[in-house]
Every structure is written in C-alpha cells, then in structure tokens.
Amino acid sequence: MTTATPRGPEPAAAAPGTSAAASPGATPRTGDTAPTGGAARREAVAPTAEAGPATAHLTPELWARAGRQLIRKALAEFAHERLLDPRPLPGGGWSVHSDDGATEYRFAARKLALDHWQVEAGSITRHRDGAELPLDAIDFFIELRGALGLSDEILPVYLEEISSTLAGTAYKLTKPEPSAAELAATGDFQAIETGMTEGHPCFVANNGRLGFGVHEYHRYAPEAASPVRLVWLAAHRDHSTFTCAADLDYDTLVREELGEEQLARFAGVLRELGLDLADHHLIPVHPWQWWNKTSVTFAGELAARRLVYLGESEDTYLAQQSIRTFFNTSAPARHYVKTALSVLNMGFMRGLSAAYMEATPAINDWLARLIETDEVLRRTGLTIIRERAAIGYRHRQYEAATDRYSPYRKMLAALWRESPVPRLQPGERLATMASLLHTDRDGGSFVSALVKRSGLAPEQWLRRYLDAYLTPLLHSFYAYDLAFMPHGENVIMVLDESGTVDRVIFKDIAEEIVVMDPAAALPPAVQRIRADIPDDTKLLSIFTDVFDCFFRFLGAQLATDGTLDEDAFWRTVAECVADYAESVPHLADKLRRYDMFAEEFALSCLNRLQLRNNKQMVDLADPAAALQLIGTLPNPIARFRAGGGAEGGGRRCWGRLPAGAPGAGSCGEGVRPGALVV
C-alpha cells in the first residue's frame, strides 16, 4: 500500500464484521486426508506440532527482550506520527505519560532528520507512584489507548496483532543467526530473505498474521524458513479464468512449472473421477488456505467436482517476506508463486481477487516495454520481474452475494512471477532491499558491512545505490506520472562481487503501480492503473514512500554506525536528484511544478491508518480518502538546492552512466568519480 496514495492491494480487504483471527473451521488432524473424490498419490497433511516444542520460544527472558524492542519502536514511530509528544526531562532524556498521567515512560533518544526518533532500547524504564515497574508491551498500548486513538472495537484485535508480533520476535531470537558481516560477505538470496528480523520499518504491529496457529507459524512464516509444498487443485474452465503474458501460453507454463511426470499424475487423478485434464485449469494454493478456507468455504464446489484436489507439489518452496509469495528452492529458475491467503496482516486480509488478476500479465507487459524503450530507465539498469500469468476461480454464488471488494471473492487465485535468478551474470548475487535496514543481535548492520566490503567511500557506495534505485523512481514520476510501491520488500538489489549495488529489480507490479494522470493514454487492458490523484499529494509517492518510509531509517542507521553522517547522506541524495533534473531539460516545467527541493512536505502516517481500522486500513472504493496527513516534515534535501549557498554550492559525481547520456547528470567526460564539481 502506498503511503502517498493508499491504494492497498486490491485483493486485500478484511472480512466483513468478523474478528480478524477467526477461521471457518478447525485445522484437520494429522493423517486426515483432503476431500478429493478420488485418490491422489501424495495427500496434503495438515501441519501439527506438539504444544511444548512449538511454544519453546515463549520464555520470560525472550518475551521481555521482544517487548523492549517493540516498545522502543512504538515510542519512536508514534512520536514520529505525532500520536505521542515526548517531553524533555531535566536531567536529560525524554518522558511520555499514560492517558491517566499515572504511568511514565522514560528513555534516551536522538532526534534526526525527518523527525526521526532514534530511541535507545536499553534506556527505557517504566514508573508509577515513585516505583519502577517492569516493561510490558501489552500494558503499554492499554495505558496509551486514548493517545493512540484505539477504539473499544479495534483495541483487542490490535493487541492480538501485537502479541503475535512479539511471539514472532521471540522466535527469531532463538534462531542461529549469521552476523551482518557474514550475510554481506557470503549470504545467498534466500538466506538473506529469511534472515530479515524486523518487518516493515514503520508499522509497529507488523507481524500480526492473524489466522496462523503456532504450528502453522513454524510451517509458513518466512523467518521459519521451512520448506513448503503447495497444494494443487483442478478448476473447471467454465468457472476459472487464466491470463498470461504475450510470450506465454497455459500449456507451456504448466509443463515448465510441473514437469511431464507430475502433470501426468494430476491427469491420472482426474481420469479416476471420469474427468479430463483438458477441461480444467490447474491452480496452486497455499496449504493454510486449503485447510482453513478452500476445503470449507468452497465445499460445494468440491462436492460438485468443479474443483478437484490433486495433491501437493513435487517442488519445495520458501515463503517470502510478504508471507503469501513463494520462491521455488527445488528449481530456482522457475517462477515465484503468489497465492491467496485469508490471513489478517498489517491492515488487510491477504487474498487475491480472481477478477482483479485478469489484467495482471497485460500490465506487466506494458511496464516492461516502457522500461525497455526508455533510455534513462534502461541505462540505470532497472528491470522488473514480470507477473507473467494469473489464474482465478469465480465462485458464482459468492459473487452474486457480495460486492467486488469482498474477501469472499479473493480466496482462490494465484499468479506466477518471473524468477530473477536466470538473469544473473557471473559474480552477481541478489538481496532484498529490506536488508539495508537489517541489524544483527550485536548491532552490526548489513548496509555498513556492504559499504566496508566494497572498499568505496561511503558517499560513493550510496550514490551508486541511489543511481540504481532513486533515479528510476524520479524519472518514472516526471516522465510518465508513474509511481511504484518501492519499499524494501518490493525491491531486489543486484550486488556485484564487492557488495556494491549494480542495479535493482522492482516487483509486485500490477497491484501496486499507479499512473497519476487521468488523461494518460493507456492500452485498454491497463486502464485500471490510472488514478486521479490530487496534485498536492502526487509527490508524496517519493517524499513519503522513499524519503520517510525508507531513507529516514537508512540514513539513521548509517549515522548510528558511524559510517556516514546525516548531512553527507542527505547531501548525496540531493546530488542524485539535482543531477537527474539537469539531465532532463525537457522536463524542467514539471520539475518546477513538483519541486523535490520544496522546504517541506506533508507527513503521511501509516500507524494511524492501522490504529483506526486494523481490519481494513483503506477503503478500496476511495483509497485517497484514507490518507492520514498530520502536519508537515522539513524536507532534508531542501537546503542543498543548487545555488542555495555554501551547503548547496557543489556536488559529487559518482555517476554510473556514460557522460552526456540522459540521466547521467553533468559529470563531464573524464571527470574522476567522486570529484567535487562546482
């Protein structure tokens, strides 16, 4: 969900009028087999675990450590969103009082750019009636429920999300963990992906996953890194819809993904029931979704054999940070699979809409062509991994009973997304951009380890990253009114052997991109990405989504590590913006109209959305109305505007583009990278 224009994933609406954690049926016992109407060679077995081992991470020590970390984040982010107003203490430090004034939280913190509170976790203490009390994260939210605006209806569900987030942190503390330096030196793509410990940097309740039982957490949470076999169903073509990219077809896809032997096995299951594989589409399903939703909510479709259970995949997968997307570890060059998952997480039920998925491949094809034909984007190295095929099942009775935003329309759909692995060159490796905010238990940070490993000056390493990441976002906005949702989990970095960012790959395209021009000429199949966004909020797609929700944390981490001070960080960002602007004189009017060097921009708040309605943060019928704009933030690059005095009088050119090329800025031929140009 973009913070500038809260689109929210279209398939992500909450269950109407229900507790978010409720599931429609009990998880089947070990040994229960799926209702098939015919035998399959491999039966899906519901995951189980003994209560003791499954909850071994829930100890007083680990719970206390997790609680302290979460209260640290809550103090920092709620102060940033102006829900809390910390007051300075006479002897140093800061203080926040509970709603009734009886409980006081004291802590040490530094205030950095963008009103970022760098709170020291070890400094936090809790006091009442002259006595120090132990920290308790659940108590924290109850004591401050008024300040946070938590209603009687929302509070208990939010506390459940907090409890789940705490439990996840406690589990992560039990895992053997490579140091940040080890990850930076030798971590492979999936070791880094499953090694992330924080989740979304802004959201406090960021690992709710309401609907997972503790045994399901161990099976399906990304940090558990447990191999998963997907469930496969056959759906009659009269009730299912398949669409694909122009360079693909259904038969090719299923043969490439399943192989002839597995496809023959599935055909055999259907033959035993007197059914023909040619009359059906094959749909991959998250195992949790099968046991908890599909086998219950779609029971009538199974009984009528419009849906048929076929068995589990031969390939094994790993859940990614988004929890409903899977990476194929048996055959990494095969597609990711993204599935519907009716679990509440960060303000949405994570379903997928069959109707909404239809246009997904066409949107990806359109964007891929745009990138390939635009010289600036092409030279930055930007690529996307396309969502090449989508499939969905249309339950006609639920469609007749609900509107298009209903979660009942988002329970059975999937898409296939390209793997980035085949495109790697020798010496290159992949890492989620979320890793740039990762710290290990000893405080070592992944980004500083990369900088050290590269041998480059910190500003030079940062500039190469910005050329690869920020420049494409700027050009997409100014040239095409196009905005992505470029948070850490949606961006994959391609690192060279030294740990320098060579280029980036954007993903999660069709659900997240928006063209903010109602008059834009778009192909008919791509029309849905057009949106009429108020002029004064368009640039929040950079200011909020990039500056406030990612660079705020990245700059703070580099400064805390002593790798790069704040001034140098934001000066380097400003130089990247200025060089881009100078390279596209034909866009000068638009650059003036949407000024990246404006003195301030609106503060758009994510936690306020979740605290207001954690079952559905955004009204999908009117997403722009959901914006929570609370005052303004000083723009940290405003003082570096060209010609703005001593601080803005020069810039360093680290550029990775050839001199004179669009997007290359004003670094002349033969200028040494890093030389100060005045």
Image: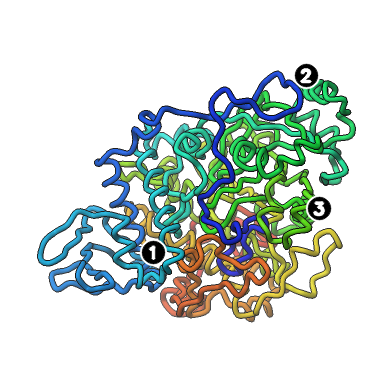
Instruction: Give the image location of residue 629, x and y in percent.
Output: 50, 76
Report, in whole angstroms, how far the alpha carbon at label 3 lies from the one at label 1. 38 Å
424, above or below 246, in the image: above
Tag in front: 1 or 2: 2
Disc with the residue nearer the chain's start (1 vs 2) = 1
Look at mark 3 in the image and give the residue it sits on. Answer: 362
Pick the residue in front: 69 or 113.
Answer: 69
Kind of residue sitting beneath label 2: Glu
Around disc 3, counting alpha carbons within 10 Å, would you say few (fewer than 14), some (14 to 19), or many (20 or more)?
many
Pick the residue in front: 179 or 398.
Answer: 398
Look at mark 1 in the image and give the residue it sits on. Answer: 77
Look at mark 2 in the image and give the residue it sits on. Answer: 261
Report helix, strand or loop for mark 2.
helix
Tag in front: 3 or 2: 2
Tell me, for residue 676, which label it has, or none.
none
Instruction: Give the image location of residue 674, x and y in percent.
Output: 49, 56
The structure residue drawn at horizontal position 44% and vertical position 38%, both measured from the top left corner, is: 214
Around disc 1, counting alpha carbons within 10 Å, would you say few (fewer than 14), some (14 to 19), or many (20 or more)?
many
Query: What is the quadrant of the N terminus in the image?
Result: bottom right
Report, in whole angstroms, how far the alpha carbon at label 3 lies from the one at label 2. 31 Å
